[in-house]
């Protein structure tokens, strides 16, 4: 039976970012840290747990996008390595922890679930876009009418600049909303990508560099 580490609140990395600030956050696990050969694994989020009644051992759960390191993480050959866990947010290091005896305990590959919040945003943007397109079409027709009247010199001089400014403003708003909708669609697509959930067991945890790196045998 495992219980969350006392400092779990500090050890929870944010989920896949929706804003620029969160986009700079990250979780990095350096497998074989301090050894002649080390592999860097990056994750989107994690949870660190310690085992009750153990001498510092526990579990590290990672959620990450599959990449070239996936094969190594999925192996279950009993190899135990030292590792360094680094957590950053907005360019600031929040945590560095050293783990000993790290080995894969479990691996699961899943498809990311759709985000209801993103879907609500998409519907709202599409509704706004539909309204803007209608306003833009109406403003364009009005501009054509004003231009025709201006050629006949039967309209006030201020009407034509005003009509053109109206069309230009709506064109800009329309383009910005379309760009926002495109960015939202790309974000939703990333969330629906495959993701892997990796559980790593470790024998020990320290918040200071260990004097003994542990097992550094060839991998």
Image: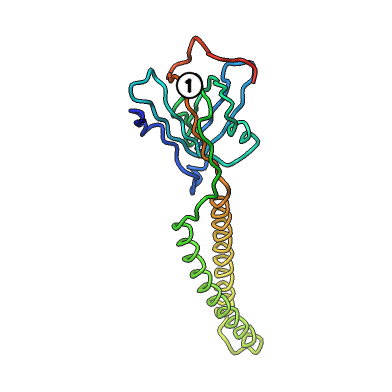
Say whether residue 69 is left or right of residue 50. right
Quadrant the N terminus occupies: top left
Residue pictured at 53% horizontal, 25% vertical: 103
Residue pictured at 44% horizontal, 19% vertical:
204
Q: Quadrant of the C terminus?
A: top right
Residue 38 x %, y %: 62, 22
For the view shown, which residue lies furthest in the top direction? 211
Report the label total.
1
Residue pictured at 48% horizontal, 13% vertical: 210
> For mark 1, what is the residue?
99
Image location (x, y in percent) of residue 111? 55, 50
Of residues 135 and 205, the one nearer the viewer is 205
The image position of residue 209, as x and y in percent, is: 48, 15
Which of the pair 145/126 is nearer the observer?
Answer: 126
User: Camera-side residue: 209 or 102?
Assistant: 102
Q: In x, y percent, where is residue 134?
A: 54, 77
Which element carries disc 1, helix, strand or loop?
strand
Q: Residue furthest front?
A: 77
Corner quadrant of residue 164:
bottom right
Residue count near mark 1 (Cα–Cα under 10 Å), binned few <14, some 14–19, many ≥20: many
């Amino acid at each position: 039976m495992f219980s969350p580490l006392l400092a779990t609140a500090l050890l929870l990395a944010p989920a896949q970012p929706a804003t620029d600030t969160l986009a700079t956050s990250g979780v990095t696990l350096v497998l074989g840290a301090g050894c002649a050969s080390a592999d860097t694994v990056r994750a989107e989020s994690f949870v660190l747990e310690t085992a009750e009644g153990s001498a510092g051992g526990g579990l590290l759960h990672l959620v990450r996008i599959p990449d070239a390191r996936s094969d190594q993480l999925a192996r279950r050959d009993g190899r135990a390595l030292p590792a360094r866990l680094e957590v950053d947010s907005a360019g600031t290091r929040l945590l560095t922890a050293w783990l000993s005896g790290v080995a894969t305990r479990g691996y699961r590959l899943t498809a990311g679930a759709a985000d209801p919040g993103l879907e609500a945003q998409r519907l709202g943007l599409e509704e706004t876009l539909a309204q803007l397109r209608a306003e833009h079409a109406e403003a364009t027709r009005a501009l054509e009418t004003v231009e025709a009247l201006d050629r006949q010199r039967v309209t006030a001089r201020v009407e034509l600049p005003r009509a053109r400014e109206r069309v230009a403003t709506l064109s800009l708003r329309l383009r910005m909303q379309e760009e926002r909708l495109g960015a939202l669609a790309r974000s939703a697509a990333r969330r629906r990508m495959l993701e892997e959930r990796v559980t790593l067991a470790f024998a020990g945890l320290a918040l200071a560099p260990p004097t003994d790196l542990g097992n550094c045998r060839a991998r």
